[in-house]
Image (tube, rainbow, N blue to C red):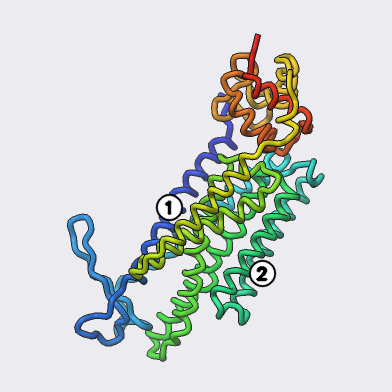
């Protein structure tokens, strides 16, 4: 039996990562919505900041938020933390299995920087945990008390990291490391601030000590940060499906624009929770994404100018750079079947998947992975010209 451990481990970790992420993001979105929809209790209740009545699934729910802590600790208190921890742990494990164990294919692009496998891994980890250190430093500085200015500075830091990573790693490897920086900061907020502060609140309450309201305020601050970073990190999780973005020579800028659009759209819904309707934020977010689509749709001049590329030339390029993975029986280590079922080892296969070839190897540099076969710009342009002429085969 030919059992591919890596493939099934990849599937299991990815599935777990998505499930845990849905649970974490769902809980986060719900509590942001809940917090923004609380109303002063009528009649007033001692210690209660706000309450909300809701109906769902045929039942009524009554939620109350206390300024610090209730007068008596309930017997059962649920802590929302494992959704975040499981998301990060499964994501980091997936990063190791796919991008670190498979660094020569998925992470290293020798045309950008000739890393050794160990060097690439060390650089990736330095960006992830260095990003966390920078974020924590900014939060704990006076800048942390100025939310808008903090947001702009942190956005510029992430954009700078994206620029550097897209010039060091493969397209997919660069994007996934930007996502890992954001995800690590988000789970760091839970692990380093929100949960420890909640534990201190509970301990002070049980000991009869006064509860410091700043502990709750710090947790709220980090929770707000997390909700603004959610949509950008979700896009990065699925970005490998959009090579027109990840493989663009201005990929770092496209990611910054998409992220800014995501933040704008998320802010619209946060305001809407308060009953404030400002469609300008939705419009701004949509226009930023549209602007990205316009930039990403611009084709390389070389591909536009070249003409009369015969099929044998295109076939030779595909045979040299593509069929080790994209064939009925791949010979590339780590592939037991052609990715997404796309096989280019026959003329019919090349014609059928010509659009995919153009998307990933002509209009972007996403393929070959890490450019391990060293395809040239001229070869990409020749493939593009053959496809533009109708992808004709014998």
Q: Where, by quadrant of the figure, is residue 323 drawn?
A: top right
SS class, disc 2: helix
Q: Residue at x 58, y 32 (%)?
A: 4
Judging depth in this view, the residue of 137 and 87 nearest the camera is 137
Q: Quadrant of the C terminus?
A: top right
Q: Where, by quadrant of the figure, is residue 273 drawn?
A: bottom left
Mark 2, other Cα within 10 Å: few <14 / some 14–19 / many ≥20: few
Residue 363 lies, with reference to residue 354, above or below; the image says below
Mark 1, other Cα within 10 Å: few <14 / some 14–19 / many ≥20: some
Residue 324 is left or right of residue 289, and the answer is: right
Q: Residue at x 58, y 42 (%)?
A: 240
Judging depth in this view, the residue of 67 and 158 nearest the camera is 158
SS class, disc 1: helix
Q: Is residue 78 visible?
A: no
In the displayed orientation, state which residue is furthest to the top: 394
Res 134 label: 2
Q: Is residue 314 visible?
A: yes
- In the picture of the structure, the residue carrying the numbered disc 1 is 22
Residue 179 coordinates in the image, percent (x, y): 59, 54
Residue 264 lies, with reference to residue 353, above or below; the image says below
Q: Residue at x 63, y 19 (%)?
A: 391
Residue 266 coordinates in the image, percent (x, y): 45, 60
């Amino acid at each position: 039996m030919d059992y591919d451990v890596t493939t099934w481990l990849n599937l299991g970790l990815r599935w777990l990562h998505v499930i845990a992420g849905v649970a974490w993001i769902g809980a986060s979105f719900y509590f942001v919505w809940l917090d923004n929809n609380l109303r002063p209790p009528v009649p007033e209740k001692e210690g209660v900041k706000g309450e909300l009545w809701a109906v769902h699934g045929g039942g009524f729910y009554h939620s109350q938020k206390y300024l610090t802590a209730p007068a008596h600790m309930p017997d059962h208190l649920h802590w929302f933390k494992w959704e975040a921890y499981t998301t990060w742990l499964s994501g980091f494990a997936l990063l190791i299995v796919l991008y670190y164990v498979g660094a020569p294919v998925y992470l290293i692009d020798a045309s950008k920087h000739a890393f050794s496998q160990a060097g690439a891994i060390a650089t990736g980890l330095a960006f992830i945990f260095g990003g966390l250190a920078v974020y924590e430093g900014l939060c704990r500085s006076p800048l942390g008390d100025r939310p808008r200015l903090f947001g702009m500075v942190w956005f510029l830091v992430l954009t700078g990291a994206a620029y550097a990573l897209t010039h060091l790693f493969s397209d997919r490897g660069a994007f996934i490391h930007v996502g890992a920086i954001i995800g690590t900061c988000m789970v760091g907020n839970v692990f380093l601030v929100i949960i420890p502060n909640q534990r201190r609140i509970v301990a002070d309450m049980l000991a009869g000590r006064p509860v410091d309201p700043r502990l709750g305020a710090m947790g709220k601050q980090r929770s707000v940060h997390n909700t603004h970073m959610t949509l950008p990190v979700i896009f990065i999780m699925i970005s490998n499906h959009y090579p027109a973005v990840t493989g663009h020579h201005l990929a770092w800028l496209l990611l910054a624009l998409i992220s800014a659009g995501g933040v704008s759209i998320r802010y619209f819904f946060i305001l809407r929770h308060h009953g404030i309707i400002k469609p300008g934020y939705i419009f701004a977010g949509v226009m930023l994404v549209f602007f990205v689509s316009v930039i990403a749709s611009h084709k390389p001049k070389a591909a536009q100018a070249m003409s009369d590329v015969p099929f044998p030339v295109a076939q030779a390029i595909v045979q040299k750079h593509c069929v080790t993975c994209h064939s009925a029986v791949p010979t590339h280590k780590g592939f037991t079947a052609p990715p997404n079922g796309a096989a280019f080892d026959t003329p019919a296969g090349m014609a059928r998947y010509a659009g995919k070839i153009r998307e990933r190897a002509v209009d972007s540099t996403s393929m070959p992975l890490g450019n391990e076969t060293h395809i040239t710009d001229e070869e990409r342009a020749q493939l593009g010209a053959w496809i533009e002429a109708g992808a004709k085969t014998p």
